[in-house]
Image (cartoon, rainbow, N blue to C red):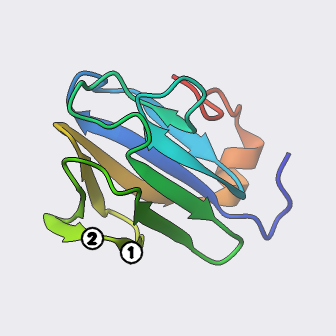
């Protein structure tokens, strides 16, 4: 279980092949892509195998485009690196994910049912 200073973040697929999938994480880093073993593994054929990289720390979440063919957008703007904030919409391929920092106390009290996988 994450420590009290660890933010818990959630990525929810709002549009695309994987719609309604959700992914929750504590401090970690990894890939968004089609590649097996990605932190956020998506089925969208327009998503590169290693599309973007996430770094989730105690104080921030940063997304980096991983030189993807179709680019990575945050709130409709193509990025190479971007700090994420509550409500940001990340677009990779034809997939849109909504980013949120989860209330830690509520999340720790409840079950952590979707820890990083669909």
When asked about the image quadrant of residue 32, the answer is top left
- Name which residue lies at 68% across and 69% down: 57
Q: Are marks 2 and 1 in contact (CB under 8 Å)?
A: yes
Looking at the image, residue 9 lies above or below residue 43 = below
The answer, for residue 29, to whether it is visible in the render is: yes
Horizontal arrangement in the rendering, residue 10 relative to residue 109 (left or right): left
Q: Is residue 68 left or right of residue 105?
A: left
- Counting from the top left corner in percent of width and height, residue 88 is at 30, 63
Q: Residues within 10 Å of mark 2 (few under 14, many from 20)?
A: some
Which residue corresponds to mark 2? 79
Q: Residue at x 45, y 64 (%)?
A: 63
> Where does residue 105 sit, x and y in percent of width and height?
72, 56
Q: Is residue 102 visible?
A: no
Please tell me which residue is depicted at 38% across the width and 28% down the height of the picture.
42
Please give left or right for residue 83 compared with residue 4 in the image.
left
The disc placed on residue 99 is none
Q: Quadrant of residue 19?
A: top left
x, y percent for residue 65: 37, 60
């Amino acid at each position: 279980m994450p420590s009290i200073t660890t933010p818990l973040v959630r990525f929810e697929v709002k549009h695309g092949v994987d719609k309604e999938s959700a992914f929750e994480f504590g401090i970690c880093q990894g890939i968004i892509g089609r590649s097996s073993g990605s932190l956020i593994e998506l089925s969208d054929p327009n998503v590169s195998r290693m599309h973007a990289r996430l770094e989730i720390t105690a104080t921030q979440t940063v997304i980096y485009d991983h030189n993807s063919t179709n680019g990575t957008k945050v709130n409709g703007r193509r990025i190479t690196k971007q700090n994420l904030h509550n409500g940001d919409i990340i677009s990779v391929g034809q997939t849109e994910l909504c980013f949120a920092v989860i209330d830690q106390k509520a999340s720790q009290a409840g079950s952590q049912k979707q820890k990083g996988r669909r």
